[in-house]
Image (cartoon, rainbow, N blue to C red):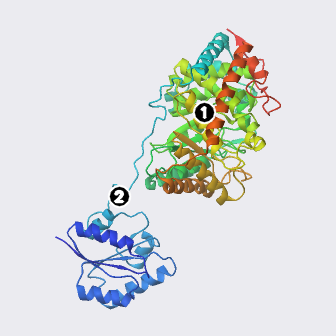
Amino acid sequence: MGKRVLLAPLDPVHDIGLKMIKRGLDEAQHETILLPPDLPPEEIVREIVDKKVDTVLLSRTLGYGVAEVLAKFVDLADAAGVREKVTLGIGGMAIRPELAAELGFDAGFGPGTTVEQAVAFVEGRELSTEGVQVKKTKQDMTAGYSYQYRHSNIGSLLEVISKMILAWVENKTSPGVERAKVRDELWDINRWLNRQENKEFMAEYPKLCGEIPRKYYETGELHPKTRRFTPEEVKGLERYLEDVKARMSVQKLQHTRKKPIVFNQYGTGCPYLDIGHVQVSEAWGADGVVHFDPSWGARTEGFLDGFLTHQEDGTVITPANLNRIHGALQESTLWQVRAHRGLNTPETVVLAGKIGADLTKINFCYGALGAGTDPERLLVDAYHSMKYAIKYNMPFDVVTNEELCGVPAYKAFAGMLIVADLAVRLGAKPILQPLFCYSPEVMISGQMEDNYIDFNAAKIFALRSIVDAPIWPGAPIGFLTHSEDRVQSSMTTALHACLASALEVDAISIASSDEAYSGGPISVPSKIDTLRATMEGFRFFGQAGIAPTKKAEEWSQDIVAGIEKVLQEVLQTGDFVQAIYAGLLGSREEGAYPGRAGRGTVTTI
C-alpha cells in the first residue's frame, strides 16, 4: 500500500536530492508532496498536519547551524502533536546518521545515500546497503597480454642478450640462492603456523645467514634497531583488527573506467602501524598495497623471525610480520612484497609466495645500479627469483627507479626490457614499470619545461611500440613534483594519475602527500589526501582524454632509438655483467654506481 510522503528542504535553495527521491517514490506508487525551498519550519509542520502524511523527508545541505535548525524542527513537530504520528527522516550533505539519531529523527542519510535506500526507509523495509557497498575482486593485470614484440629488431637483440645471460648464470649460485632453496624445500609453513618445530629447516638455515640473523637463531639476540611486540600490544592489535573488520567497507577510485589499478605503499617500520595504513588505503579505495622493506635488511644475509617492530623507515621482513599483515588484508586487496634488490631477493620471493603475496618486484639492473648490490650477485639471485615467482604464480613489476639517480629513460628502459625478456623466456609474467615523474633527466634536459604530460606520455608510447605487455607507472607517480604543501602534492599526484588513466595503463603506484617531507613515518591523513585527490581526478575526467602535443611522439621515437642503440652496445660486450660495470645501462657520470653488497659471493656449481 502506498504511503503519503511530504518532502521539504530546510535550505534556501537546495532540493535536487529530494526531487530525485520524489521521482523514485512516484515510480514506486507512493503519493508525494514536494514543498519549495526556504519555507520556515513552522509552515512545514503546518503542512504535515494539514496533509495528514505518513512520512516526512527533510533535507539540509548547508552545514551552518544544522544542529540548531533540526532540533528546532523536532521541537515544533512535538509541540504540534505530529512527531509520534509520522516517520521522520533527514538527509543531505550536512547530515550524519549519528547527528540525526541524537536529535530525534528516525533516520539520517549522509552523502552517498541512494534513492533506493530512501524508498526502502519510506516503505519500512530494512535499509539495504546492497548496490551501495562496493564489491571488489583481485585483478590480474597481466591477463590478455601476449608479450609479443612489435619492434622486431629490439625483440631480436633481447633474445640474444637473454641467451647470453642464461649461458652465464645457469651454473652459478650464491648464499641468497641457497637460503631460498632451504626456505622453499624445508620450511613447512603449516608447521610454522602451528608453532611446531621445523628441525630440518633450523639445521640448515642459520648456517647460510650473516652475523645478525645467525646470532638471532643461536642466542635470540635481535638487531639493535628492532624489538618484539609485547603481549599487550599483540592483544591490542587483535582487538583493533576485530573492530575494524566488522566496520570495514571499501571504495572504488576509478569512477567509470576499469583501469588503472591503484597501489599505495606502506613501510613505517612498525607492522602495527603498517596494518593501520593498509586499512586506511583499502577504506579510501586503493586496490593494492606494496610492502616496503628496510635498508639494513637489504644488506643482510638472511631473515630474522618473530613479530618485530623496527625503528627506521621500512618494515623488517620476517615470516611473522608478513603473516600478520597478510591476515589483515581485505580479500580484494592485491599485495605486493618487493624483492627487487638486496641480498635476500630470491628468499623474499619464496617467503612472499608461501605466505600469500599476489605480486613481487624484481629488477637486476636497477637493483645493481641504484641500491648497492653487486651486479654479478644480483643477476644470479634475480634469475632464481624469477623461477620462484613462476612457481608461486606471482607476476612482478620491473621498476626503473634508476632514473631517479640520473640515468636517462632510454637506458633504464633498455635494462627493464632485458629483465622482462629474460622473465618471459623463463615463463614469468613481468610488468613494465616506467618512472612517471619529474626525473633528473628532464630537469637537466628540459623536456618538462612546458608540461608534465608529453615526456611521460612518450615513455608509454615508446614501450607500447616495442612490446605488448602490461604497464604499471610508478614509483610513485608524480615523484619530484611534490613539495611540503600537502594540497600541492595531492594535486600533482592526482594529475599524474589522470594522465596515466587517459593513457589506459594497467596500474599506478601513488605516494602519500607527505612522503617526501614527513621527516619520519608518513601520516594517515596524508595517505588519504592523495587517494581522495586521485578519486576526484578520475571523477573529473571520466572517459574524457588528455591530448599530449606532437612532442610526445617525437620523444617516444628518440627513446626507442636510444633503447635499440644500448641493446646493441650490451650485445657487443659479450658479457652482461661487464656491460653493467661499463655503464652501458647507467654510468657513474649519470649517477649510477654498481653496488658492492654481496661482491665475491657468487660461486660456480
Classed neighbour count for the residue bearing mark 1: other residues with Cα under 10 Å, few (<14), some (14–19), many (≥20): many
In contact (CB < 8 Å): disc 1 and disc 2: no
Relative placement, left or right, of 194 versus 401 is left
Q: Position of residue 180 (x, y in %)?
A: 61, 22
Kindly report the distance in space between the C-alpha atoms of the residues bearing marks 1 and 2. Answer: 45 Å
Q: Position of residue 501 (x, y in %)?
A: 52, 46
* Residue that badge 1 annotates: 462
Classed neighbour count for the residue bearing mark 2: other residues with Cα under 10 Å, few (<14), some (14–19), many (≥20): few
Residue at horizontal 65%, vertical 54%?
A: 513
Q: First in sequence: mark 1 or mark 2?
A: 2
Residues 29 and 135: in front is 29
Residues 559 and 422: in front is 559
Residue at horizontal 69%, vertical 38%?
A: 294
Number of numbered discs on residues: 2
Q: Is residue 515 visible?
A: yes
Q: Quadrant of residue 369?
A: top right
User: In the image, is residue 542 above or below residue 551?
Assistant: below
Relative placement, left or right, of 374 versus 148 is right
Relative placement, left or right, of 432 versus 56 is right
* Residue that badge 2 annotates: 129
Going by the numbered disc 2, the residue's amino acid type is: Thr
Q: Which residue sits furthest left?
A: 1
| Quarter of the figure with the N terminus | bottom left
Label drawn at residue 430: none
Residues 449 and 174: in front is 449
Relative placement, left or right, of 137 versus 419 is left
